[in-house]
């Protein structure tokens, strides 16, 4: 004879199944993945070729100046340089509007998502992080990454989204320092709002509210270049 299941246990099991079914039915759908905001570029220059990323912003493109400074884009979006901030390492490319109102672009704050293409990779990668502090050289801003590995060459020029999915900055470089007894990895980014202000004639400044934290060493630009055969 099969053992009888106590009524209380059977009732509890049935109730749990109903709750699980209701929870699954009533759970809000996962938000859709945001549209890509970075594209891969391959460049050929004087005796070298290299990889990088460009940021889709509104109707055009942005990138770090060093991405497009040493070569011509042969694969990826067809872009030309419209305006350059050499010291800031920022470039406005085809379709972007250097005269856009800086106040129309939010300043990066809180959690962010970085997107770009590691060198040679054909699939974009997204990393999460959080705004950490302004750099001592404005208008750079440091993002502390959640990722256990540093950024590699090819991410330069990629995009940064804020918590609302808005494109707010462009990736320029990377650095690492010990924090709380372990290595932490950082990305140095240029806020689009700051780049717009600078290209329109306002010298770059950094907000003072976040100063006082230890800062990473000067950023390195991971070298994605390879000599031509």
Image (spheres, rainbow, N blue to C red):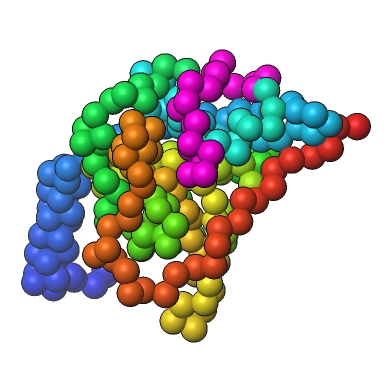
In what quadrant of the picture does the C terminus appear? Answer: top right
Q: Is residue 79 magenta?
A: yes
- At 84% from the left edge and 37% from the top edge, which residue is drawn? 227
Residue range corresponding to the magenta coloring: 73-92
The reply, left or right, for residue 211 in relation to residue 67 is left
Q: Nearer the viewer, residue 146 or 21?
A: 146
- Find out whether residue 121 is within the magenta segment: no
Tell me if residue 210 comes above or below residue 70 in the rendering: below
**Residue 133 visible in the picture:** yes
Can you say which quadrant of the picture contains the N terminus? bottom left
Tell me residue 148's x, y (percent). 52, 64
Q: Residue at x 10, y 60 (%)?
A: 15
Give the percent coordinates (x, y) of residue 165: 28, 39
Q: Is residue 43 above or below residue 6?
A: above
> How many dots with numbers?
0
* Residue 80: x %, y % from top left: 55, 18
Q: For this view, does 97 lie left or right of residue 80? A: left
């Amino acid at each position: 004879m099969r053992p009888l299941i106590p009524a209380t246990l059977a009732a509890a099991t049935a109730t749990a199944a109903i709750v699980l079914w209701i929870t699954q039915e009533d759970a809000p759908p996962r938000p859709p993945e945001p549209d890509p905001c970075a594209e891969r570029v391959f460049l050929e220059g004087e005796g070298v070729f290299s990889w990088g990323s460009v940021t889709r912003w509104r109707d055009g493109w942005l990138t770090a100046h060093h991405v497009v400074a040493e070569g011509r884009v042969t694969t990826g979006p067809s872009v030309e340089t419209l305006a350059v901030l050499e010291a800031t390492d920022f470039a406005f490319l085809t379709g972007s509007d250097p005269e856009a109102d800086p106040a129309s672009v939010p300043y990066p704050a809180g959690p962010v998502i970085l997107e770009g293409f590691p060198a040679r990779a054909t699939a974009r990668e997204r990393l999460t992080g959080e705004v950490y502090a302004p750099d001592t050289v404005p208008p750079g801003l440091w993002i502390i990454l959640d990722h256990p590995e540093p950024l590699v060459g090819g991410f330069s020029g990629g995009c940064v989204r804020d918590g609302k999915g808005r494109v707010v900055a462009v990736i320029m470089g990377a650095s690492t320092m010990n924090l709380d007894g372990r290595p932490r990895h950082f990305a140095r980014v240029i806020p689009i709002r700051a780049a717009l202000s600078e290209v329109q004639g306002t010298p770059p400044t950094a907000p003072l509210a976040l100063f006082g934290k230890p800062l990473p060493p000067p950023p390195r630009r991971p070298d994605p270049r390879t000599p031509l055969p």
